[in-house]
């Protein structure tokens, strides 16, 4: 898809007068969707007092001299009730199914700003990890939230500031999914099941790019990174093991199909075609135009290099290169214009199109097929009697023709998604016991090392290195064998039938018996991470 570009950077600093109503209010609009998991919600909330002035616990920064005093305050405050609950994976998003393009384009974040967005999201009080999936059909924020309600509220307010769209308006179009439902949604997205065009392959490439951009970015951490990597696995499996991709179309091919539907049949062979943008989307448009029999077209691009590459690939097609300075003149000589650039501002305004010469009488009006988000053709152009403008939302007309085939293919893929969903949930659940496993191993290692040191000191200096190694190996063997049973009952890798509740009971029992204080350790880590982010 065309790179989702917007005024993200240009709009900073954000307006102060953006409406800040509660993001947790549920709209009755038909656009609003929420799917609630059958699993009980469990959350873990942390509010570090010294992070920002909006914190629920009012404390002067200078009054807290150390991390331990912050911990003591949290332990004695009402916030402590959250620390023993689990954090949640949440997706807050708008897509082609819930929001019109005029809303989505205001929220679109260009790839160059994804890392900045992750940093800003993770600076929010109740957000631990984050990722941004911004394409021409969707703008979705995936987070690990310490509190579902507060996390959703903070992210929605952040989206409102970013876009200038009031919270009340966002709430009409957004969807919220939690934990297993959020995971399932991303798996369906990567598999192409949630796309406007079922099975289209470009969305998987975009999910891969989220991981590529997120590598090394603070806040794109274990859970979110693991979620997106697993989604890539799902997308690959669905495309390999089902026929969802066979005969499927992309947004670009649907755009070409739409143009053919709107052109009078006698003009198929004679219509003059202009493609603006020779990136990924533009190349796909050209490919599908050639497949439909187009043998001559003009391509406007910033440089000629990509156009030269296209000429090499399509040697039987006359592809004429024009620079952006010639765009207006080239548009005047075209009957059908495809726009697919990452421009943050419209390329065609009403006054530009008004000046273009008329097309032939059999065509009637000049066709603009705009598949960019933000849009390359200003909406007011459609007011002209000489122009007909279509955007990505209008592709639904093409897609609707295959509804039964889409449902059948989706059912094939759903079996794989459910299987992989269970694997991911087992992996995610296993993370709950990781701190206990680490603490328990460290506890056993301290005892082992201490006892070995006592033994060696009693044996004096005459003991050989071979004997020392034998004692060391003996101690390691005893500890590993003793730990094996408890560790097996703490792991949750999906290889057995033990329910998560049993594993968490085992974890709590070991924490109590050996006084491991895992919850406090995890709380310390969260506070430390938040403090480090606030410094940066």
Image: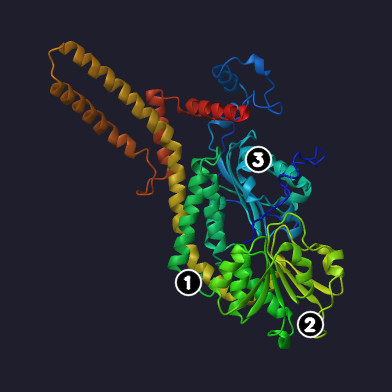
**Which x, y percent locates residue 500?**
43, 43
Q: Residue visible at 69% across and 75% down?
A: 258
Say whether marks 3 and 2 touch (CB < 8 Å): no
From the viewer's perspective, is the residue at label 3 or at label 1 nearer?
1
Q: Which structural element holds mark 3?
A: helix
Query: Which tag is nearer the camera, tag 3 or tag 2?
Result: 2
Drawn side of residue 431 relative to residue 347, left or right: left
- Where 91 sits versus 374, above or below? above
Quarter that holds the N terminus: bottom right
For residue 331, what is the image quadrant?
A: bottom right
Which x, y percent locates residue 301?
67, 63
Residue under circle 1? 243
The reply to whether residue 239 is visible in this rendering is yes
Q: CA distance from mark 2 to mark 1?
A: 38 Å
Label 3: which residue?
149
State the CA–CA distance, disc 3 to disc 1.
40 Å
Query: Mark 3 or mark 2: which comes first in sequence?
Result: 3
């Amino acid at each position: 898809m065309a790179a989702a570009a917007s005024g993200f950077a240009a709009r900073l600093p954000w307006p102060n007068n953006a409406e800040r109503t509660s993001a947790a209010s549920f709209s009755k609009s038909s656009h609003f969707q929420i799917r609630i998991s059958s699993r009980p919600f469990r959350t873990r909330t942390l509010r570090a007092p010294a992070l920002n002035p909006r914190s629920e616990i009012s404390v002067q920064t200078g009054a807290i001299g150390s991390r331990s005093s912050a911990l003591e305050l949290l332990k004695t405050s009402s916030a402590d009730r959250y620390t023993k609950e689990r954090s949640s994976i949440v997706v807050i998003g708008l897509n082609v199914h819930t929001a019109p393009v005029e809303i989505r384009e205001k929220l679109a974040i260009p790839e160059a700003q994804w890392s900045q967005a992750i940093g800003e999201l993770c600076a929010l009080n109740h957000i631990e990890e984050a990722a941004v999936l911004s394409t021409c059909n969707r703008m979705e924020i995936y987070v690990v939230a310490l509190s579902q309600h507060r996390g959703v509220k903070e992210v929605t307010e952040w989206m409102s500031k970013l876009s200038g769209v009031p919270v009340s308006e966002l709430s009409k179009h957004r969807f919220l999914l939690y934990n297993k439902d959020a995971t399932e949604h991303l798996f369906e997205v990567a598999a192409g099941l949630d796309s406007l065009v079922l099975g289209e392959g470009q969305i998987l490439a975009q999910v891969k790019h989220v991981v590529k951009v997120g590598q090394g970015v603070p806040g794109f951490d274990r859970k979110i990174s693991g979620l997106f990597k697993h989604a890539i696995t799902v997308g690959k499996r669905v495309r390999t093991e089902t026929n969802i991709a066979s005969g499927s179309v992309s947004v670009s091919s649907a755009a070409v199909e739409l143009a053919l539907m709107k052109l009078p049949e006698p003009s198929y062979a004679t219509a003059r075609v202009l493609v603006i943008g020779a990136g990924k989307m533009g190349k796909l448009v050209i490919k599908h135009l050639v497949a439909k029999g187009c043998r001559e077209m003009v391509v406007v691009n910033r440089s000629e290099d990509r156009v030269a590459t296209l000429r090499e690939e399509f040697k039987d097609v006359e592809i004429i290169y024009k620079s952006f300075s010639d765009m207006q003149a080239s548009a005047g000589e075209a009957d059908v214009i495809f726009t697919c650039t990452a421009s943050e501002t419209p390329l065609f305004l009403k006054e530009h199109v008004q000046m273009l010469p008329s097309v032939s009488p059999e065509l009637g009006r000049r066709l603009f097929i705009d598949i960019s988000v933000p849009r390359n053709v200003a909406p007011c152009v459609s007011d002209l009697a000489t122009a007909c403008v279509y955007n990505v939302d209008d592709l639904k007309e093409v897609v609707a023709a295959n509804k039964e085939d889409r449902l059948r293919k989706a059912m094939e893929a759903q079996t794989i998604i459910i299987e992989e969903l269970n694997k991911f949930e087992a992996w995610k659940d296993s993370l709950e016991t990781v701190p206990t496993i680490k603490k328990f191993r460290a506890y056993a290692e301290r005892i082992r090392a201490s006892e070995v040191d006592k033994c060696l000191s009693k044996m004096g200096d005459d003991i050989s290195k071979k004997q020392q190694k034998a004692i060391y190996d003996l101690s390691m063997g005893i500890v590993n064998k003793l730990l094996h049973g408890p560790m097996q009952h703490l792991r949750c890798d999906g290889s057995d039938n033990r329910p998560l509740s049993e594993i968490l009971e085992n974890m709590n029992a070991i924490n109590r018996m050996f006084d491991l204080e895992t919850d406090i350790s995890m709380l310390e880590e969260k506070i430390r991470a938040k403090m480090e982010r606030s410094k940066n």
